[in-house]
Amino acid sequence: MSIWPDDIWTSAENLLESFVAKGWLVATAESCTGGMIAGALTEIPGSSRVVDRGFVTYSNAAKVDMLGVSPVTLDQFGAVSRETALEMVRGVLMQSKAEAAVAVTGVAGPGGGSPDKPVGLVHIVAATRRGVILHRAMHYGDIGRDAVRLSTVRTALEMLQVLADQAVAPA
């Protein structure tokens, strides 16, 4: 029995199968999910063939130190922004052997929101080493911390699957 809901288990399993078929590795950079995406992936037996590494960069200092996010970006746009998520995904690709990566940063709640960045706002960026970049600004709403985090895991896995589905398998 898994700790994950069935749909997340199935998505993670399908994603890993797609990455195995392509010979890809995956890496994650997570703020508001605190490692849950990597956790969902590594729940699947055999995930070591695909999962390279995960970075939990909850603080701004961790984003700067571990992923090379610019302090200027954090000052200008904030931790919860498209710009920060883009720098996070670039950083995780630079610090890993992964062909594809995902980065998430958001406000899971219950507090911490603002009019510009309400509870439930999460920026998710999935990218490949070959330069394909997907970004989604998800407005899950104030649905509860657990629900925001699980919804983010679902969306991140879906975005990684889109990258895998669009790519051509190696010859």
Image: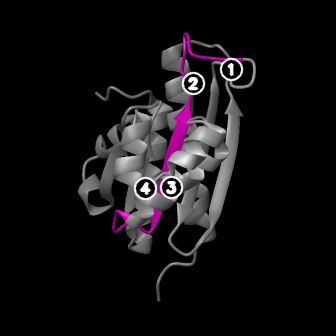
Q: Amino acid at mark 1?
A: Pro
Is residue 157 something that shows in the picture? no
- First-in-chain label (2 vs 1): 2
- First-in-chain label (3 vs 2): 3
- First-in-chain label (3 vs 4): 4
- First-in-chain label (2 vs 4): 4
Mark 2 and 1 residues: CB-CB less than 8 Å, in contact?
A: yes
Q: Would you name the residue on which mark 1 appears?
A: 118
Relative to residue 20, is residue 43 drawn left or right?
left
The residue depicted at 38 percent of the width and 39 percent of the height is 61
Query: Is 117 rendered above or below residue 128?
Result: above
* Circle on res. 148: none
Is residue 48 something that shows in the picture? yes
Residue 29 drawn at (x, y percent): 42, 47
The residues tagged by marks 2 and 1 sit, at their Cα atoms, a distance apart of 7 Å
Q: Would you name the residue on which mark 3 appears?
A: 89
Q: Residues within 10 Å of mark 3 (few under 14, many from 20)?
A: many
Q: Would you name the residue on which mark 2 appears?
A: 107
The residue depicted at 35 percent of the width and 49 percent of the height is 65
Please give the range of residues in magenta.
Answer: 95-114
- Front residue of 79/22: it is 79
The residues tagged by marks 4 and 1 sit, at their Cα atoms, a distance apart of 26 Å
Secondary element at tag 4: loop
Mark 3 and 4 residues: CB-CB less than 8 Å, in contact?
A: no
Q: Amino acid at mark 4?
A: Gly
The residues tagged by marks 3 and 1 sit, at their Cα atoms, a distance apart of 22 Å
- First-in-chain label (3 vs 1): 3
The residue depicted at 65 percent of the width and 41 percent of the height is 76
Residue 101 drawn at (x, y percent): 47, 57
- First-in-chain label (4 vs 1): 4
Query: Is 164 rendered above or below residue 79?
Result: below
